[in-house]
Amino acid sequence: MMSINIGISTEDRAKIVEGLSRLLADSYTLYLMTHNFHWNVTGPQFNSLHNMFMEQYTEQWNALDIIAERIRALGFPAPGSYKQFMQLTSIEEVSDVPKATEMIKLLVNAHETVARTARGMFDLVDQANDQPTADILTQRLDIHEKTAWMLRSLLEE
């Protein structure tokens, strides 16, 4: 295999990939949670939540590819198994079927967790002069913070 010479050291690329792997695991766990809630939501808000969750998990699904492909562009394999994701994620798995309001709260917390994971990478990414990763992080932060706000708004009386 040809060596990679993109202006970021192997050591820095490896550290960035560690962070991106955690971001991918958090994002996948959030995707799965959102899809699960789309399938299983009930109650008076069923239609609006069912549709909202579908929009959210579709956006999240597309983001997974962007994150994984950045890991590959940096020269490392992307994690891709449930076992790897469970080891890397900061989001706790939901094993039961919560009520709609609890689903919303769990999703707010999960979106905020993904945002913290992304935000925690900026110092390293900036030091390594890795603008493409910084761009992905900025886009993900924008979406997760906005989605958390929208979900929190549903909890207001």
Image: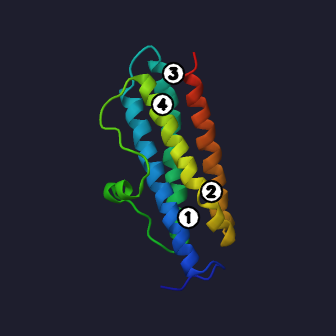
Task: Check whether the beta carbons of the residues at disc 1 and disc 2 lie within 8 A of each other.
Answer: yes
Residue occupying the point 57% across, 36% down: 148
Residue that label 2 marks? 136
Say left or right for 29 vs 129.
left
- Going from N to C along the chain, the mark reached first, 1 or 4, is 1
- Going from N to C along the chain, the mark reached first, 4 or 2, is 4
Q: Secondary structure at mark 4?
A: helix
User: What is the C-alpha distance between the residues marked 4 and 2?
Assistant: 25 Å
Q: Amino acid at mark 4?
A: Lys
Q: Amino acid at mark 1?
A: Arg
- Going from N to C along the chain, the mark reached first, 3 or 1, is 3
Q: Amino acid at mark 3?
A: Ser
Task: Check whether the beta carbons of the residues at disc 3 and disc 4 lie within 8 A of each other.
Answer: no
Give the number of the mark in front: 4 or 2: 4
Residue that label 4 marks? 105
Label disc, if present, on residue 70 of the rendered structure: 1
Give the number of the mark in front: 1 or 4: 4
- Going from N to C along the chain, the mark reached first, 3 or 2, is 3
Q: Secondary structure at mark 1?
A: helix
Image quadrant assignment for residue 93:
top left
User: What is the C-alpha distance between the residues marked 1 and 2?
Assistant: 9 Å
Quadrant containing the C terminus is top right
Image quadrant assignment for residue 118:
bottom right
> Can you give x and y, in whole percent of width and height, for residue 19 in the image?
52, 63
Q: Eyeballing the image, is 86 above or below 50? A: below
Residue occupying the point 68% across, 66% down: 126
User: What is the C-alpha distance between the residues marked 1 and 4?
Assistant: 30 Å
Q: Secondary structure at mark 2?
A: helix
Say left or right for 128 vs 11.
right
Tally the marks.
Answer: 4
Task: Check whether the beta carbons of the residues at disc 3 and disc 2 lie within 8 A of each other.
Answer: no
